[in-house]
Image (cartoon, rainbow, N blue to C red):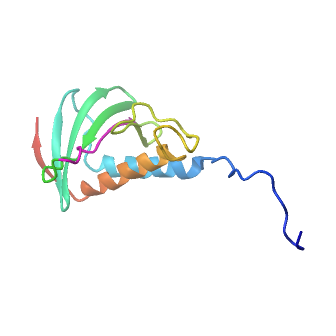
Amino acid sequence: MEKGLTHSTSHQKPRYQPNVSDFLALCGRNYGYMQKWLPLDIAVGQSWQLEGEVGVLVIRILENTKYTQLVEISRPVQILEFVNTPKVLVRIYHDAKLAEVLTGQQIYQLRPVYDYPNLRMYHSDEKYQVNAFLGELLKIGSQQRLVCQS
């Protein structure tokens, strides 16, 4: 064996370890984006649209408690019929000032970490990626105007 080289019998990558600080910072930023347009006194079932420069967000309140809200956020994509409407279910924690994605398109319960490879080919950091996607969606509504409310 050449000098400086070591022979390893294991070719496995180290297991992914989530960075909790980065994840909480991301959820905090998402909460900040949402507070720009989320009314405090809103009833369950109410929905509205926000129109930004690059699209529209449809927001619907599913649950409203003293410290949390459950919100469905979607971005209709009407031009492309073969693309599903991006939709996420978000739990807003007002006491902690965090917004976290609970479910996304075809994912009904996000785990903190996925083994990779896996049957559905989720990324190891799928939960972080879906919350980062929420951040991108929320940028649409960051300089918004209210289109309609029901």
Q: Quadrant of the N terminus?
A: bottom right
Q: Position of residue 33 (x, y in %)?
A: 34, 52
Membership of 87 in magenta stretch: yes
Q: Which of the two residues, 38 or 60, is positioned nearer the viewer here?
A: 60
Give the residue drawn at x 45%, y 50%.
129
Query: Does residue 90 appear left or right of residue 146 in this picture?
Result: right
- The residue most toward the bottom is 3
- Which quarter of the picture shows residue 63? top left
Q: Quadrant of the C terminus?
A: top left
Residue 97 place in picture, x, y as percent = 44, 42
- Taking the image as shown, residue 108 lies to the left or right of residue 112, namely left
User: Relative to 108, does residue 125 appear above or below in the rendering?
Assistant: below
Q: How many marks?
A: 0
Toward the viewer: 49 or 74? 74
Q: Residue at x 25, y 32 (%)?
A: 61
From this view, report whether residue 31 is shown above or below residue 72: below
Left or right of residue 15: residue 8: right
> In the rendering, at what x and y percent does residue 21 appear?
58, 50
Residue drawn at the location 27% of the way across and 28% of the way down? 62
Does the magenta segment cover residue 143? no
Magenta stretch bounds: 82-92
Q: Position of residue 32 (x, y in %)?
A: 37, 50
Q: Is residue 5 above or below residue 117?
A: below
